[in-house]
Image (cartoon, rainbow, N blue to C red):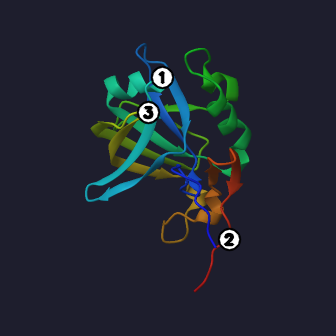
Amino acid sequence: MKESVGTSTFMYPCPLVAVGTYDAAGKPNVMTVAWTGVVNGNPACISVSVRKETYSYQALMTRKAFTVNIPSQDLLKEIDYIGKTSGRDTDKFAATGLTPVRSTLVDAPYIEEFPVNIECQVIRVDDLGLHTMFIGEIKDVKVRSDCLDESHMPVTEKIKPVAFLPGDGHYYALGKRLEV
């Protein structure tokens, strides 16, 4: 038997990423986003959805660029801090000790310490109500060399990404690889 839990954002799990932008003064900023995903294959595109009240919203609207940075489980304290602090009040890079790197492809910083960085140019903006979805065309994906296999493909077990469950507000490790 199943029970209805009503209308909810009950898509489990959500990947936890950090979205990098530059504010109006050119200061690097980063926010956590769990509402993200692949939206197209050719051109390769991903989306991030943010509320208009966030500090990063205006940067996304004006700079038309962002990075999606995938943290490892080793950086859970930093990603948690990023998610609980506003860039309006705090320099999150200085507070966490993380390093912003200026992308040469898009007008947004990526995070040196995170194992995966995806550089995106905004190609579409959709106001969905509470959230605005920014669709970014992927211009490059950078993966730390120790997280690649011998054929230069990313290895999930080496990246150690983090998932977020909006229902309980906790972080989870990606499980082991399953064989069919």
Looking at the rendered image, the disc whose residue lies closer to the viewer, 2 or 1, is 1
164 with respect to 67 (left or right): right
Disc 3 marks which amino acid?
Answer: Leu
Q: Are marks 2 and 1 in contact (CB under 8 Å)?
A: no
The residue under the point 56% across, 52% down is 15
Q: Is residue 156 visible?
A: yes
Amino acid of disc 1: Glu
Q: Residue under circle 1? A: 53
Quarter of the image that includes the N terminus: bottom right
SS of the residue under disc 2: loop
Q: Position of residue 71 (x, y in %)?
A: 61, 47
Q: Which residue is mark 3?
A: 130
Label drawn at residue 176:
2
Q: Which residue is depicted at the point 41% across and 31% down?
A: 108
Q: Which comes sooner in the sequence, label 2 or label 3?
A: 3
Viewer-nearest of discs 2 and 3: 3
Q: Is residue 109 visible?
A: no
Residue, x 32% and y 31% (percent of image)?
64
Position of residue 177 measured from the top left corner of the image (x, y, whole percent): 63, 74
**Is residue 73 shown left or right of residue 17?**
right
Mark 1 element type: loop
Q: CB under 8 Å between callouts 1 and 3?
A: no
Q: Is residue 23 above or below residue 116?
A: above
Q: Quadrant of residue 25?
A: top left
Disc number for residue 78: none
> Which part of the image, by quadrant, shows the C terminus?
bottom right
Which label sits in the foreground, 1 or 3?
3
Give the mark nearest the N terminus, 2 or 1. 1
**Label 2, label 3: how many angstroms apart (C-alpha)?**
35 Å
Q: Considering depth in this image, is 62 or 159 the residue closer to the camera? A: 62
Tell me how far mark 2 sits from mark 1, CA to CA. 37 Å
